[in-house]
Image (tube, rainbow, N blue to C red):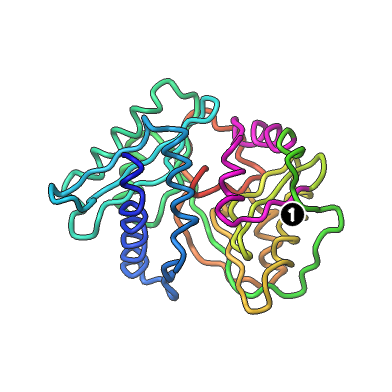
Amino acid sequence: MTDADVPAAQELMVTTFSDLARRMHEPEPPQPDPDPGPGYVRLRRVLESDPGGCWVCDDGDGELTGAGLAILREGVWGLSLLVVRPGRQSAGLGSELLSRTLAYGDGAHGGIILASLDPRALRAYARAGFALHPTVSASGVPRGVAAAPEVRPFTRADHELAAAVDRAVRGAAHGADLDAMAAGGCELLTFPERGYAVHRAGEVKAIAAFDAQAAAALLRTVLARVPASGKAQVDWLTGSQQWAIAVAVAARLELRAGGAVMLRGDAGPFHPYLPSGAYL
């Protein structure tokens, strides 16, 4: 993959996920973001940090038919993106892209994949040795939620705390990934000495903390900051994240079956933690 592929990879990602939502009969398929800027930031961050893990394929006429992006952070591998254009799926492209991205992680002590409900993807990841942890998502207009007074905006000085929390819950620090999230329009919050959260207008991008009480306080604060006309979206809630499920239920969010968090090797306890779809 090269930087020239970024706009086409973003279009491919939107097209593929929209098609998946229709096939999975989601009640409200996600609408394409009119501003592709945050998507470009995400793709360029991964391409800059992990060029060896970024692969695309095309049809010979310049149109991208697939993309696979993987990252390595302190010995933990993650699949940031794997998409194949509708109409070209189940023809081997996805398997080849997955093989290239997995090869980039040879020697990694841990691995993370956030899988959709697509049965083909779940099967492929399970065959690659990843343990499946089913998830639910929570969405809707939060009600009766108050921000935790201890939580404040994240500053550059909080990077050291974030790195320590990341290593405790997922075995590796995100580092400059957090700066890329901010550059993509996310707000970062911190519970001093205990954890941090990343969200964009109520859509949770990541929450990590040393303890479940702090993680819950961060999630409540994110929900309290949802605009009056907006909705909250909290994904990747496994059975081990009961602290987050309790907050979502108390806020009267709607729970629905989601995809799966898939882990291999040592990726930390993954608790209390809501992973980032882009940076896992």
Residue furthest to the right in view is 149
Where is mark 1, residue-wise? 218
User: Quick one: quadrant of the N terminus?
Assistant: top left
Which of 31 and 115 lies nearest the eye of the viewer?
A: 31
From the viewer's perspective, is 194 left or right of 77?
right
Considering only vertical position in the picture, is 232 above or below 59? below
Which residue: 31% across, 47% down? 5
How many numbered marks appear? 1
Secondary structure of the residue carrying tag 1 is: helix
Q: Check if residue 164 falls in the magenta segment.
A: yes
Which residue: 19% across, 47% down? 58
Residue furthest to the bottom in view is 229
From the viewer's perspective, is 170 left or right of 159?
left
Q: Position of residue 252 (x, y in %)?
A: 67, 73
What amino acid is at disc 1? Leu
Image: magenta residue range: 161-190
Which of 198 and 209 lies nearest the eye of the viewer?
A: 198
Considering only vertical position in the picture, is 251 above or below 211? below
Which residue: 37% across, 66% down? 21
